[in-house]
Image (cartoon, helix red, strand yellow):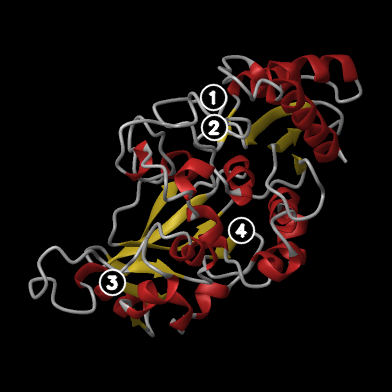
Amino acid sequence: MMSHSDLLMKTEMAMPRTLKQACEVQSNGLHDKNDIPGMPLPVLKAAGIDLMDHWKEGLTAPGQVSNLLALRDPSLHRLSADSIGALCTLSAIADSTAVRKSAPVIAQAAESTATPQIRNVATAGGNLFQRPRCWYYRAHQFDCLKKGGHMCFAVEGENRYHAVFGNGPCHIVHPSNLANALSVCQAEVLVVSSAQGTEEPRRVPMHQLFCLPEDRLKSEHTLGPDEIAVGISYRAAPHSAHYEVREKQSFDWPLVMASVALDMRDDGRTIAAARVCAGGVAPIPWRMPQVERALAGINVKDTQRVRQACDLAIRGAQPMSNNAYKLRILPVAVSRAVRLAVG
């Protein structure tokens, strides 16, 4: 394995000042792509937290990096009641009065992530597009499927933190807290590229942004290598909440998490419609239509019916040898998120 210093010495850094420049770099590289046959396109970097992890773990050695923090576009840092710039920090999202009032679930998900130090630099875009935390993927000693190998070591190995839905052939869980919250707010990610220009971003709904390993094994999302996510638009969800279950309350990855958004009838007690998304249980943010249908029409004071609806969260689950415990705590996480969303 190459040393950390060796990896860094072999890397060139681009500092684009405009989105147009960033798209050109991402399309052509720092050099004319015909000059160096086989040279991969630059890796995008914002805060670089996950990228540095990959470097230190010997999992990547990008020849070129495009530093998005050099961009001088204020829209990338803008926060409002219906939009989030891709370079907004998680702290800014968690502290935003506009976001917290419009969609509490988003602010709560941002607030629950990592530690204050990380939230102060980690960005919305980086949180969405971070790579899996599977310990076999993260260890260079294991040539797993996601790295071009021939097997998923979690199948017969240690899989306590792996998927119980959408399994196979790779059993990762998606690591983003924010993705689940944005899903229930019917968010769209705004994407630009050199080919389509930067004036009218392509809008990608959250349910089309991520993909299962069976559809695209080496990537967790559907964007092309020359595309750049520049922002997120979302719908207001004042009756919404995010809840996580962890082994410890300090810096830790959730065992399971649940994001819920409710549309309430005029009486303020009856659920007209619900959107439920679970995390820590599948390779993508996992929507739960069976729970959503069961919650519709329920009076929130009827705790038994609410609990029965939330118990449907485990329908269709296929636990592995060491993670069936998630089936016991997932309905609890969903139920508590519903309770918090009601207020």
Alpha carbon separation for disc pair 1 and 2: 5 Å
**Which label sits in the foreground, 1 or 3?**
3
- The local crowd at label 1, few if under 14, some if 14 to 19, many if 20 or more residues have their Cα within 10 Å, is many
| Residue 276, visible in the rendered structure | yes
Where's residue 264, x and y in %?
77, 33
Q: Secondary structure at mark 2?
A: loop
Q: Which residue is mark 1?
A: 165
Identify the disc placed on residue 63. Answer: 3
Q: Residue furthest right?
A: 301
**Residue visible at 66% across and 61% down?**
81
Q: Which residue is mark 2?
A: 282
> Mark 1 or mark 2, which has the lower sequence index?
1
> Mark 2 or mark 3, which has the lower sequence index?
3
Q: Secondary structure at mark 3?
A: loop
> Mark 3 or mark 4, which has the lower sequence index?
3
Q: Quadrant of the C terminus?
A: top right
Q: Quadrant of residue 43?
A: bottom left
> Mark 1 or mark 3, which has the lower sequence index?
3
CB under 8 Å between discs 1 and 2:
yes
Which sits in the foreground, 81 or 30?
30
Identify whether 211 is placed above or below 100.
above
**Which label sits in the foreground, 1 or 4?**
1
Q: Which residue is mark 4?
A: 82
**Residue visible at 34% across and 81% down?**
14
Identify whether 31 is placed above or below 216.
below
